[in-house]
C-alpha cells in the first residue's frame, strides 16, 4: 500500500502473530524491513514511527516481501496494517 500525506510524522501499527512475516516500510525513499512475527498474538503493535519530518508532502509505502522471519515457519509470510496515524 502507498499513502501520500502532509504532516510532520507518521506511525504504522500492525498485528503480530505466528502467521506474519517480513514487511518492507519505505518513507520518502528510505527503506527498512520489519518482522511482524510473534509466538503469541500482539495487537496494535507499533512497527514503524517517524517524527520531526519537515512539514509538507511525504510518501509512505508498506510492502509484502514474501519472506518469513528466521524463527518462523517458511509459510509464515502474511503482513497486515492495523492503523496509520499522521501527525500534523
Image: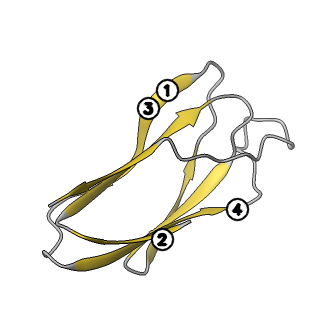
Q: Is residue 85 above or below residue 88?
A: above
Residue at coordinates 74% horizontally, 34% vertically from top-left? 19
Q: Nearer the viewer, mark 4 or mark 1?
A: 1
Q: How far apart are marks 2 and 4 (CA)?
A: 12 Å
Q: Distance between the residues labelled 4 and 1?
A: 21 Å
Q: Where is residue 8 in the image (x, y as percent from the top left)?
A: 16, 66
Q: Name the residue under label 2.
A: 31
Q: Residues within 10 Å of mark 3 (few under 14, many from 20)?
A: few
Would you identify the image quadrant in which residue 21 lies? Answer: top right
Query: On the picture, is 42 further left or further right than 17?
Result: left
Q: Which of 70 and 37 is in front in this view?
A: 37
Q: Nearer the viewer, residue 31 or 81?
A: 81
Q: Is there CB contact under 8 Å for labels 2 and 1? A: no
Q: Residue 43 carries which label?
A: 1
Q: In which quarter of the image is the C terminus?
A: bottom left
Q: Which of marks 2 and 1 is in front?
A: 1
Query: On the picture, is 51 further left or further right than 12?
Result: left
Q: How crowded is mark 2: few (under 14 residues within 10 Å), some or many (20 or more)?
A: few
Q: Is residue 14 above or below residue 48?
A: above
Q: Name the residue under label 3.
A: 44
Q: Is there CB contact under 8 Å for labels 4 and 3? A: no
Q: Is residue 74 above or below residue 18?
A: below
For marks 4 and 1 on the same chain, the one whose residue lies earlier in the sequence = 1
Q: Mark 4 points at which residue?
A: 65
Q: Distance between the residues labelled 1 and 3?
A: 4 Å
Q: Where is residue 63 in the image (x, y as percent from the top left)?
A: 61, 64
Amino acid at each position: 500500500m502507498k499513502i501520500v500525506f502532509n504532516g510532520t510524522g507518521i506511525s504504522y501499527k500492525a498485528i503480530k502473530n505466528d502467521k506474519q512475516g517480513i514487511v518492507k516500510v519505505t518513507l520518502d525513499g528510505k527503506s527498512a524491513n520489519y518482522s511482524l512475527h510473534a509466538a503469541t498474538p500482539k495487537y496494535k503493535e507499533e512497527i514503524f514511527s517517524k517524527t520531526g519530518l519537515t512539514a509538507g508532502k511525504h510518501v509512505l509505502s508498506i510492502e509484502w516481501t514474501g519472506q518469513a522471519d528466521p524463527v518462523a515457519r517458511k509459510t509464515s509470510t502474511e503482513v497486515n496494517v492495523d492503523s496509520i496515524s499522521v501527525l500534523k
